[in-house]
Image (cartoon, rainbow, N blue to C red):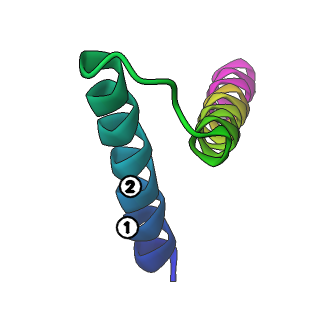
Amino acid sequence: MFGAIAFAYGLLTSFVLSGASRNHRLRRPNPPMLVYVGHVCFGCSAGLSAMLFLHAAQTLIE
């Protein structure tokens, strides 16, 4: 189950980043939905990174 979720998240993130870089190269504004999905992907990545860091620190202390 985790593999399917990670694959879908990777595809979504790849789509958002390639769309944003294409729009930047063509000097066009990003559609609002692309910006919102990009913020959600960034938030999920940052949150998961913080949780994994705290988990690693906790296991190091114990």
Q: Which residue sits at x=70%, y=33%?
A: 43
The image position of residue 52, as x and y in percent, is: 63, 35
| Most distant residue in the bottom direction | 1
The image position of residue 46, as x and y in percent, is: 65, 28
Q: Quadrant of the C terminus?
A: top right
**Cβ atoms under marks 2 and 1 closer than 8 Å:** yes
> Eyeballing the image, is 2 above or below 57?
below
What is the chief secondary structure element of the magenta stretch?
Answer: helix
26 on left or right of 53: left
Q: Which residue sits at x=67%, y=39%?
A: 32
Q: Which residues are magenta?
A: 52-62
> Which residue is at the front of the view, 42 or 49?
42
The image position of residue 24, as x and y in percent, is: 34, 19
Q: Which residue is mark 2?
A: 10
Amino acid tagged 2 = Gly
> Which residue is at the front of the view, 43 or 1?
43
Q: Quadrant of residue 8?
A: bottom left
Q: How many angstroms separate mark 2 from mark 1 (CA)? A: 5 Å
> Eyeballing the image, is 54 above or below 40?
above
> Eyeballing the image, is 12 above or below 20?
below
Please rate how many residues cluster around mark 2, counting C-alpha atoms within 10 Å: few if below 14, some from 14 to 19, many from 20: few
Q: Quadrant of residue 50?
A: top right
Q: Which residue is mark 1?
A: 7
Q: Is residue 8 magenta?
A: no
Please rate how many residues cluster around mark 1, counting C-alpha atoms within 10 Å: few if below 14, some from 14 to 19, many from 20: few
Amino acid tagged 1 = Phe
